[in-house]
Image (spheres, rainbow, N blue to C red):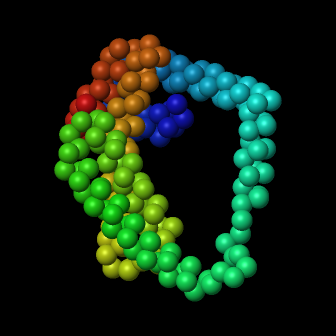
Amino acid sequence: LDVARTETLPRFAEAYIAGKPGREKNWQAMAHILMQATRVQRKAALYALEAPAVGSALLAITQWLEELPGAKRPGDDRGEQAVALRRWARQRVPRLHKQLKRALQNANTPKSQHRARILAKRLRYGIEALQPLLRRRRTQRWLEQATELQTGMGTARDVMQAGVLLGKLEAEPALVEFLRGIAFGQGQT
């Protein structure tokens, strides 16, 4: 709801309204519907957080994290750990890149495009987290490609999802069709 309301939809307001007062009313009504839905969802989230079971689960997770064994154990050799981590990183990142390449070859449906976007995100975050352990030239190129893919596919998917969301919220059908047209133009139908 927040992405649609604050990032995705504002870019298209001017194109939809195009100087027509009736469309401006529809846009304002849609903005109001989204704001109301956002408030309802936030209240639901706050309500869920007040449940004793949720608080207990959060405390248990915190306790579990605090009790995890440290990276250094008696008798461990940090040099061996560093070598093993570097070897793992240098195998993992190319494997992720290969998976992404395969996914992009078959990214012809919204579901397969979403899968490719998730793999681009994994590759991007993996490279960012493991960058000191990786070979620079190749992984820098992969990082740029993954970031570009993730951003581009994410933006297109956000438009499609905004249209679906507005349809469920019973926004003006012409506005929903306008967004479907944009999504179609971006290849996200």
Q: Decide: is 150 above or below 84.
A: above
- Looking at the image, which residue is at 44% across and 71% down? 89
The answer to whether residue 141 is seen in the rendering is: yes
The answer to whether residue 21 is seen in the rendering is: no
Q: Furthest residue to the front?
A: 75
Comparing 84 with 33, the one in front is 84
Find residue 159 and report its image quarter: top left
Q: Decide: is 91 above or below 44.
A: below
Find residue 100 and report its image quarter: bottom left
- Looking at the image, which residue is at 56% across and 79% down? 81
Q: Decide: is 186 above or below 178.
A: below
Quarter of the C terminus within the rendering: top left
Q: Give x and y (percent) for residue 120.
A: 36, 55
Q: Give x and y (percent) for residue 139.
A: 36, 72
Q: Decide: is 114 above or below 65.
A: above
Comparing 189 with 172, the one in front is 189
* Count of picture labels: 0
Find residue 40 and report its image quarter: top right
- Looking at the image, which residue is at 49% across and 77% down? 84
Q: Give x and y (percent) for residue 122.
A: 42, 56
Q: Give x and y (percent) for residue 157.
A: 35, 38
- Looking at the image, which residue is at 54% across and 35% down? 2
Question: Is 90 on the left or on the right of 130, as rendered?
Answer: left
Comparing 4 with 59, the one in front is 59
Comparing 67 with 16, the one in front is 67
